[in-house]
Image: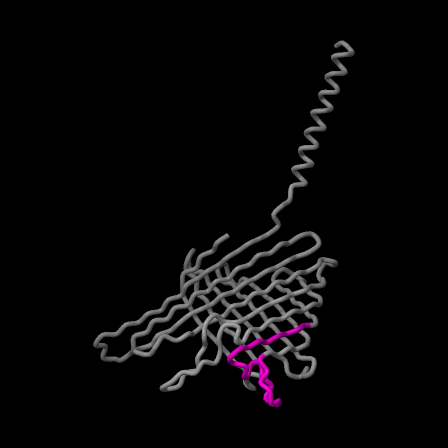
Amino acid sequence: MKPKKFCTSVVGFTLLINCSLLAQENEEKKPVNAWHNEFVGNLNLTQASFDNWTQGGENSLAWQLNLKSKSINDRENFNWSNTGKFSFGRTKVGDADSRKSVDEIKLESVLTYKIGSTVNPYFAVSGETQSTTGYRYTEDSKVAVSDFLDPGYFKQSAGFGYVPFDEFKTRFGFALKETITKNHPFPYADDPSTPEIEKTKTETGLESVTDFSQKLGENILLTSTLNLFSNLKTLDETDVKWENILSAKVSKYVVVNLDVNLFYDRDLSKKRQVKESLSLGLTYLLL
């Protein structure tokens, strides 16, 4: 081969390799979508009707809609987790008016910086309220006791989180909690010891949030979230919110849920509050 042709071949081969490496490098530098998005919705419906039924009974209709969303951006140096929950349901028994049975709106965003293997600093914000008016019923009347953002709860916290394994994570830090009201300041925001009616309340304290999830079988999942908040002025009085859900997947679109919630806030009631619901309904997973 002549020197001129040889040099030309070497140069061409070198340029081809460089172009290939450059294309590969540019491909590796393309941004990767690290967001993991999930949306789950289920609708539960219960109905009963009686006509000349000698054993007695009343017509009834109950339904409940549950929507849950999750969006997580997990990178090498941080984790940004966003969750949302919406639940609403109504029940009608006999000739009585339809009444609200479930009503909850909850949003939370947690940003965690990864500086260690299991313990990392975090910053979190959350908000919680309901969508429609809530009533307290008597035999012949009903009284409005709550509404959208009446009350509304907002919380900001910062501290350290601990994740020993995927199924368990907990965080602890300082928190600022705001309660806002409009037409129903008592007992959510008003301080009965003062002559004025306060429609907002701000509390500074310590927060602890623990999440646990465990598969009890191939199609059975237990999830539990324990939220504790202690006002720095009264550390011996801790607000407790403990949510537990046991889900069993019967088929691709049918799921049974047992939901048990325990709630304690001394400002609202000196006794603990418990809510339990068992539902069978259709579920749909998007994304």
Hey, which quadrant is residue 137 in on the image? bottom left
Q: How is the image coloured?
A: one colour
177 magenta-colored: yes
Write down the region rendered in magenta.
175-199
Farthest right residue? 3
Farthest left residue? 52
The spot of residue 47 in percent (x, y) is: 33, 70
The spot of residue 15 in percent (x, y) is: 72, 24
Q: Is residue 20 above or below residue 213?
A: above
Q: Image point 37% across, 86% down: which residue?
A: 139
The spot of residue 88 in percent (x, y) is: 44, 69
Residue 266 visible from this viewpoint: no
Hey, which quadrant is residue 277 in on the image? bottom left
Q: Image point 51% across, 52% down: which residue?
A: 287
Residue 107 visible from this viewpoint: yes
Q: Image point 70% across, 32% down: which residue?
A: 22
- In this rendered view, identify the residue nearer to me: 257 or 9: 9
35 magenta-colored: no
**Quadrant of the rendering where the N terminus is positioned:** top right
Q: Image point 40% across, 65% down: which residue?
A: 44
Q: Is residue 119 above or below residue 269?
A: above
Tell me which secondary structure the magenta stretch mostly adopts: loop
Farthest front residue? 196
- In this rendered view, identify the residue nearer to me: 122 or 184: 184
The spot of residue 48 in percent (x, y) is: 30, 71
User: Is 281 on the left or on the right of 194, as rendered?
Assistant: left
User: For the image shown, how many numbered marks are present on the structure?
Assistant: 0
- In this rendered view, identify the residue nearer to me: 217 or 255: 255
